[in-house]
Amino acid sequence: MFKVIQRFVGPASLSLLTFKVYASSKKDSPHKDTVKVNELSLYSVPEDQSKYVEEPRTQLEESISHLRHYCEPYTSWCQEKYSQNKPKMQSLVQWGLDSYDYLQNAPPGFFPRLGVIGFAGVVGLVLARGSKIKKLVYPPGFMGFAASLYYPQQAIVFVQVSGEKLYDWGLRGYIVVEDLWKENFQKL
């Protein structure tokens, strides 16, 4: 029906360019040979000659399937625990990286101060010989005292917040003891 006059061959990068193709109709061919679009082999529907047949499962496939069904609750439990712990681990890793960066670029005098605070903790352990309560109280107390000498503003903020929390805990404990006293001893 149409005859292409010129062909264009070029590199692949030129395929994005637009250009015109000139064509002319055949005047010597009769119009009886026209083919409709649905008669072309590209658009024809294949006949229903093929039939899907499922192959029987082998012993290996059966055992793998049984194993997967058996392990499914455990794998789902592991995936759930992983999704719960992943944000915590990421924040822990980020904290470690930030701490590493801080220690690499520490302000001047940071390491001697850290040494004095650590030495105060060791002195607290030495002085707390014999009692478990002393071992729990002396090292953090000595370290806190040494840290408050080097960082007084942060120590004031820490003491204020800790004091408020201790007061709140004491008030809650007082309320609980008062309720227990009223329930158990005033009924007599």
Image (cartoon, helix red, strand yellow):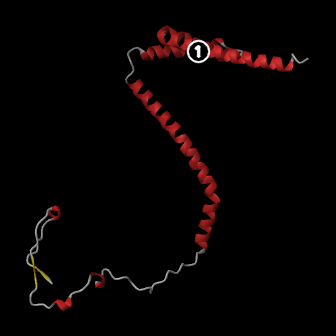
Which quarter of the figure is the N terminus placed in?
Answer: bottom left
Seen in the picture, residue 123 relative to 49 is either above or below; the reply is above
Question: To which residue does mark 1 refer?
Answer: 162
- Res 112 seen here: yes
Residue 49, image quadrant: bottom left
User: Who's the residue at 61% across and 17% down the image?
Assistant: 165
Left or right? Give the position of 80 relative to 30: right
Seen in the picture, residue 44 relative to 32 is either above or below; the reply is above
Q: Position of residue 53 (x, y in %)?
A: 52, 81
Considering depth in this image, is 46 or 139 the residue closer to the camera? 46
User: Who's the residue at 44% across and 85% down the image?
Assistant: 48
Seen in the picture, residue 62 relative to 166 is either above or below; the reply is below
**Residue found farthest to the right:** 188
Which quarter of the figure is the C terminus placed in?
Answer: top right
Q: Position of residue 106 (x, y in %)?
A: 39, 21
User: Who's the residue at 87% across and 16% down the image?
Assistant: 186
Secondary structure, mark 1, is: helix
Seen in the picture, residue 18 relative to 49 is either above or below; the reply is above
Q: What residue type is labelled 1?
A: Ser
User: Who's the residue at 55% across and 40% down the image?
Assistant: 85
Considering depth in this image, is 97 or 3 the residue closer to the camera? 3
Q: Position of residue 24 (x, y in %)?
A: 9, 80
Left or right? Give the position of 101 relative to 154: left
Left or right? Give the position of 149 relative to 28: right
- Res 125 seen here: no
